[in-house]
């Protein structure tokens, strides 16, 4: 089986896996805030730490489903959209992991404590612990980027889907001679009237 034939299912699975991981990750705890006032720890889910995580993950799932039936030109557009999404989400996740995640916990801390403003939030936060979910999600964005690259490199050579549903003049070959019941059913299947 050639790379072009294997590329479509591999790319679709890559899109769906990355999108599913993003959706699941958006509901899991990414950051745990230990409070300086000895209050209960605050758990920050992925959707709060990275607000665009859930909607863009849903978009990636939709791109994967569309990729499974898309034509040649649309495949390239879907590959470009997926690559841009992977780069954006990967960069955002990487910034959260390597930078100061105080901004990522701000909304959840404000909702829990009622305190607003960066100075007030900084006074409440004693430490922030990062879970494994952002790292796993970052791997998912690398998978999405690789799948998008696969689409962009091999997408032109994929076979087009849906040809069996088209009626072309090339399929309209009538044999000379008597027409039997099977030929009539075949003509009906192709969309032609066998009685003419």
Image: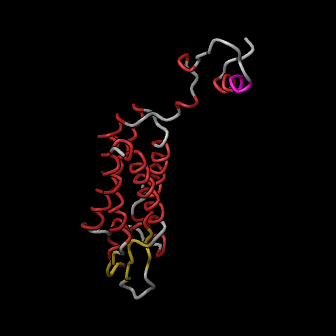
Residue 141 in the magenta stretch? The answer is: no
Q: Residue at x 55, y 20 (%)?
A: 168
Left or right: residue 190 versus residue 5 is right
Mainly helix, strand or loop, the magenta region?
Answer: helix
The part of the chain drawn in magenta is 181-185
130, above or below 144, in the image: below
Residue at the front extreme of this rendering:
177
Closer to the camera in the image, 175 or 48: 175
Q: Residue at x 37, y 79 (%)?
A: 124
Residue 149: x %, y % from top left = 30, 46
Q: Residue at x 39, y 49 (%)?
A: 11
Residue 161: x %, y % from top left = 49, 35
Closer to the camera in the image, 60 or 71: 71
In which quadrant is the C terminus drawn?
top right
Residue 117: x %, y % from top left = 37, 67
9, above or below 98, in the image: above
134, above or below 165, in the image: below
Residue 189: name its quadrant: top right
Residue at the bottom extreme of this rendering:
38
Residue 183 in the magenta stretch? The answer is: yes
Residue 25: x %, y % from top left = 44, 66
């Amino acid at each position: 089986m050639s790379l072009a034939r294997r590329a479509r299912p591999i790319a679709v699975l890559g899109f769906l896996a990355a999108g599913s991981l993003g959706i699941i990750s958006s509901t899991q705890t990414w950051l745990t805030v230990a409070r300086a006032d000895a209050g209960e720890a605050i758990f920050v889910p992925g959707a709060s730490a990275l607000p665009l995580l859930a909607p863009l993950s849903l978009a990636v799932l939709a791109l994967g489903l569309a990729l499974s039936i898309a034509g040649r030109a649309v495949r390239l557009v879907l590959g470009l959209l997926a690559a841009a999404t992977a780069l954006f989400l990967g960069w955002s996740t990487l910034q959260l992991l390597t930078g100061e995640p105080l901004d990522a916990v701000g909304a959840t801390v404000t909702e829990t404590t009622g305190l607003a403003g960066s100075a007030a939030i900084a006074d409440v936060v004693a430490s922030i612990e990062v879970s494994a979910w952002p790292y796993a999600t970052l791997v998912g964005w690398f998978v999405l980027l690789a799948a998008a690259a696969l689409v962009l490199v091999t997408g032109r050579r994929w076979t087009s889907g849906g040809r069996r549903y088209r009626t072309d003049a090339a399929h309209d070959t009538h044999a000379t001679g008597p027409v039997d019941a099977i030929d009539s059913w075949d003509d009906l299947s192709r969309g032609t009237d066998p009685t003419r």
